[in-house]
Image: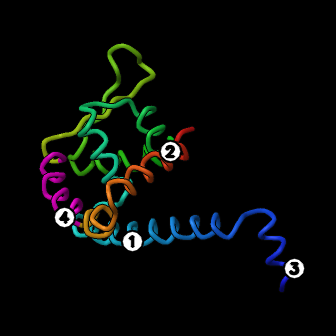
Amino acid sequence: MAEKGAAMEGQISRDELSAYFALRAAADRLQQAVARQLQEFDLTEIQFTILAQVHDAGELRMTDLAHRLVASKNGLTYQATQLERRGLIARRVSDHDARSVLISLEPAGAELLALVFPGHIALVRELFLDRLTRTQLAAIRDGLGKVAID
């Protein structure tokens, strides 16, 4: 048993492993709570993220959205189709590039986001933001920002 611990320590320190496990546990806890909250609105996490990203941008190319979400084009196309069928988003071919598909938010999508956001923000605040100092939040933002970059 000591050999396994020594081998693991040669690759990653206890502090590094502890940080990694803390990140995973926090992310898992937050993800599960968010998924439960979004189920009340018949949304998956990826669907909510699509709506929020498009709302923020006004209009997005599918390719840019896939890059932002680190999602496959097929998976994103499926989710966009589901949202479009519900009348939450619209897709159209770009006037400037026939190969580009643009996504925009429909009024029903904006209305749904207006219903979802207050509870979502309250949940994220309760489980994450309010538990950390500004300094800790800045460190997380800066550190994870480096990890999130391609």
Q: Which mark is residue 133?
A: none
**Residue range of the region highlighted in magenta in the rendering:** 109-122
Q: Residues within 10 Å of mark 4 (few under 14, many from 20)?
A: some
Say what secondary structure mark 3 lies in. helix
Three-letter residue code for mark 2: Val
Q: Are marks 2 and 1 in contact (CB under 8 Å)?
A: no
Q: In x, y percent, where is residue 28?
A: 46, 69
Instruction: Give the residue number, with chain letter if any, for mark 4.
Output: 119
Q: Which residue appears at 25% of the width and 42% of the height?
A: 89
Q: Disc 4 marks which amino acid?
A: Gly
Labels 1 and 3 touching (C-beta < 8 A): no
Asked if 79 appears above or below 53 in the picture, the reply is: below
Q: Is residue 35 magenta?
A: no
| Number of the label disc, if any, that sits on residue 32 | 1
Whichever of callouts 4 and 2 sits on the residue coming sooner in the sequence is 2
Q: CA distance from mark 1 to mark 4?
A: 14 Å
Task: Name the image quarter holding residue 19.
Answer: bottom right
Instruction: Tell me the distance, in whole angstroms, between the alpha carbons under discs 3 and 2.
Output: 38 Å
The mark that comes first in sequence, 2 or 1, is: 1
Where residue 59 appears, x then y in whole percent?
A: 28, 30
For label 3, the residue is 3
Read off the residue under disc 2: 70
